[in-house]
Amino acid sequence: MARKKNVDFNKLIKAVESGMPAKEIMSTFNIKSRIQLKSLYADALVEKGKAAPIAGRASRAGESAKKSRGIAVNKRGSLVVPRSFVEEMGYAIGDMFTLRRTKSGLSLKKA
């Protein structure tokens, strides 16, 4: 991913609000594409408090907590345990477990 361009957000907001054409704004701020212009303008609005930031991963964590704690089997046959459950239980990368079949299903025990 390319680095963010350093632009004076106040000047960018004023240019857009004054009705300056996009091509002129792009040449003034040395912006190469309309997508980059829109992204910088959105960042400027968020920084100045004129627009709310878009929620990132934090909101997804709440959703996963509501879901059941299902374990998936991937292509290699490995069991995939949700990260939220691993963190909640205090497990770390590299922890070993024993797995055995029981009458009710499977039993997973930290070794």
Image (spheres, rainbow, N blue to C red):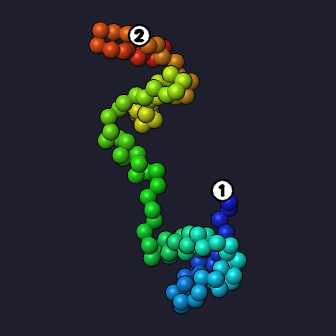
Which residue occupies the foreground of this view, 94 or 29?
A: 29
Mark 1 residue crowding within 10 angstroms, few (<14) / some (14–19) / many (20+): few
Would residue 103 be found to the left or right of residue 36 on screen?
left
Would residue 42 be found to the left or right of residue 62 on screen?
right
- Report how many numbered discs are placed on residues in the image: 2
Would residue 55 be found to the left or right of residue 47 on screen?
left
Q: Residue at x 35, y 46 (%)?
A: 63
Query: Picture quarter containing residue 7?
Result: bottom right
Q: Is residue 47 visible?
A: no
Q: Amino acid at mark 1?
A: Met
Query: Picture quarter containing residue 104?
Result: top left
Q: Which residue is identified by label 1?
A: 1
Mark 2 residue crowding within 10 angstroms, few (<14) / some (14–19) / many (20+): few
Task: Decide: is 103 above or below 73.
Answer: above
Q: Residue at x 44, y 58 (%)?
A: 55
Task: Decide: is 46 above or below 96.
Answer: below
Q: Residue at x 68, y 73 (%)?
A: 32
Q: Single out the residue that lies furthest toward the left.
A: 104
Q: Residue at x 52, y 18 (%)?
A: 96
* Residue 4 in the image, given as x and y percentages of width and height: 65, 65
Q: Along the polypeptide, which appears first: circle 1 or circle 2? A: 1
Would residue 95 be found to the left or right of residue 23 on screen?
left
* Residue 47 in the image, given as x and y percentages of width and height: 52, 72
Q: Amino acid at mark 2?
A: Arg
Q: Which residue is identified by label 2?
A: 100
Give the Cα distance between marks 1 and 2. Answer: 44 Å
* Residue 91 in the image, given as x and y percentages of width and height: 47, 27
